[in-house]
Image: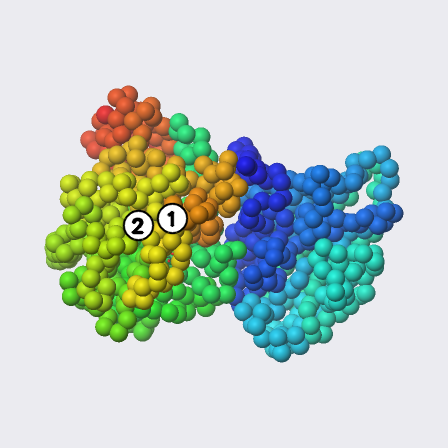
Amino acid sequence: MKFGYFDKENKEYVITRPDTPLPWINYLGAEDYCALFSNTAGGYSFYKDPKERRLLRYRYNNVPMDRGGRYLYLKDNKSGDYWSASWQPVLKNLDEYKYECRHGLGYSTITSEYSGIKTKTTYFVPIGENLEIWKMEVKATGDKPRDLSLFSFVEFCLWDALNDMTDYQYNLNIGETEVKDNIIYHISRYRVQQNVVAYFSCANAAAKGFDTQRSDFMGTYGDWSAPRAVLEGKMNGSIAGGWSPVGSQMFNFKLKPGETKTFIFVLGFTEDIKEPPAKVSKYEDPKVVDQALKKLADYWEEHLNKFSVQSEDPELDLIVNTWNQYQCLTTFNWSRSASYYESGIGRGMGFRDSNQDTLGFVHLIPKKVKQRIVDLASNQFEDGSAYHQYSPLTKKGNGSGYGDDHLWLTVSVPSYVKETGDIRFLETEVPFVGGEKGTIYEHMARAINFSITHLGPHGLPKIYFADWNDCLNLTYDKEKAESVMIAQMVVYGARELAKMAELLTKKEDIKKFNDIADEMTKKINKVAWDGSWYMRAFDEDEEPLGSHKNKEGQIYLETQAWGVMSGTAEKDKALKCMDSVRKHLWTEYGIILMTPPYSKFIPKYGSICVYPPGLKENGAIFCHPNPWAMIAECIIGRGDIAYEYYKAVQPAAHNEIADLYKTEPYVYCQMIAGKAHKNFGEGKNSWLTGSACWNFVAASQWILGIRPDYKGLMIDPCIPKNWKGFQVKRVFRGSTYYITVRNPEGVSKGVKTVTLDNRSLASNIIPPDLPGRQAGQTSGKEHHVEVVMG
Ligand code: GLC
């Protein structure tokens, strides 16, 4: 069963019924202000940091999941009937209530029609502002004049979202509001911390009344679906002094048949209490609101026009051109901090996650990636290891002790340099946590050094608390457990450092890093090859995980894919281990992370066995490493398999089975329940996931094969044999390339000829117009590239 469809032209996903299997959300706000927005107007807002600067309250473990929200109640003053403009929270019968929600790029529009009243409400965050606008049009569609009331409602959070839900003796006494000139101010803590003010107002109509104390609006025993103020049709004019501050205004108005009235609401954050009146009045004119919407559309148009494809698969085009890149930019903004599955009070910017995320948007915002890498590198210790995460507000790190975090720098930095050609970045000095400074190159070198100097009994790097697989917690008292994946990452990173050493003409380092890679490769193949695949790790008792010798957890995906990606696996091992993936891990909904899942808790393996078989790391289809298998298949040249893997986890492929898949069909989710689970095929944890960046990399750089390289733009497709070709527009180092690939011989891989503006090239790497440019410089040139495969 499906709940909506893609409107390709308008770049919108259209939800046609409100009762989606889970809240299907959108992120409004591309800069400092963020509003999570569900398809029934649920969600919360924050400024920069969802933990410390939370504007709207969210109740954890809530039922339904997405309450509270940005609610607008309508009441027919004659009949006394009332409803919501976003279906929730009043929940009118869907036989009588018409609904549609359009999630677009940075905005969402909900339309409703009930008892002869049509509403259309667009919610968005204007570019350059720390506020959200709700523009609501109310129209009488019947032939009778109508007498109506409208009630707006938000519930404020007391800023610190963790404290807000735990420390009641304190926070039930700090809530404060003020109402002045039609604007509601939320000023809790303002007396001690004068940089936190929220405000909420209708910009183009004077309220008939207001309430700012929740119990006055709701009634002590009222609730969201039947608030006292709406039932009685009157406000109490309450001002919060303790308890629970809210913002609500009431408007009475009449509509003639066919008449439309527009209400514009502004909800914002400021550090200057004098600012709100000007901000609110700026948006009293609907034309100004529409201009701000246009500016938002331009912003997204400009951001998403660097890569687009036209292939034989419209679904691939739709996801790659719009939604996947949109999701990647959302992960740039919020890493794993705030969604309906990430609480916004736990993790900040993850070191491992944020480094990987950069791969998905480096072609869109290279300057910001440069800054992000600097922030990340500043959270690396002098010994080469790193903090596990940092706070987006203070940029200060916390948590450490993972075996892999630091090595992800050796993935993000090369990708940035290949994209931009900004070699000088490698010589930029950035402090380590202790204060000592080192170049970015040095930061990477120390990352490698840490892992090759902290080895276990088999000579492989120690895993410590965990590696990429967060739930493989193999280290207890002996600190002996080792990770094969980290060893493969060392090979990958050392090879990249050797190439960078070449660019920087550091001759000794070329050899040094290639030697490190060679030696580690030898070790891996000696101690971690299991016969048909790579083992995953060694535990504290020096026993393998991911071996045929194990009863459960015999084979893991990560080390097969990374074996190929890192070049650790020579040809026959590469084919063998990827064949094993296909044989043991592939399912119709994607590749499971490992098999057989652990059926009971094994203390020395840690939290991986806490999950029921088939969920999360215990044998689910993790959408993040699935693209690693696609990349590996492209490396070994099996385009049909790579494409089949791509299609299995691609969100749009689940549109028709949305009742099973449950999460949004327009964005990737973290994982899909594996075949060992009764809900096999059910998606979980959507939006903020490394699945976004890696799937984009796999599709754009490996299947389509348009891949930045130190020397230029490489064209190396690996496609299904029956594709006749495809076209790509790619902005690269400031020039725009229109690339046409033809596949007359029906191959998967192999480039026979490349012509650049009718000039034939000797290789499949297009030399850049501005080889040594810094991020942001453009040549402004356009080129036509013709590629013939064969
Ligand atoms: C989650 C974490 C990520 C980890 C992955 C596998 O997605 O955000 O850091 O690598 O799980 O455990």
**Image side of residue 553 versus residue 59, left or right:** left
- Ligand 1's quadrant is bottom left
Q: Secondary structure at mark 2?
A: strand
Name the quadrant of the C terminus: top left
Query: Residue 692, position in %: x, y?
Result: 41, 47
Q: Is residue 330 above or below residue 322?
A: below
Of residues 748 and 378, the one drawn nearer to the viewer in this rendering? 748
Residue at point 34%, 30% (across, down)? 739
Q: Secondary structure at mark 1?
A: loop
Residue at point 75%, 48% (across, down)? 83
Its colouring scheme is rainbow
Query: Residue 101, position in %: x, y?
Result: 62, 42
Q: Is residue 470 above or below residue 624?
A: below
Confirm or deny contact between disc 1 and disc 2 (CB under 8 A).
Answer: yes
Name the quadrant of the N terminus: top right
Query: Residue 624, position in %: x, y?
Result: 37, 49
Tell me if the residue at label 2 has its CB under 8 Å from ligand 1.
Answer: no
Q: Residues within 10 Å of mark 1 (few under 14, many from 20)?
A: some
- Amino acid type of disc 2? Thr
Instruction: For marks 1 and 2, give the CA distance.
Output: 9 Å
Q: Which mark is residue 595?
A: 2
- Amino acid type of disc 1? Ala
Residue lying at the far top of the rendered structure:
744
Q: Which mark is residue 676?
A: 1
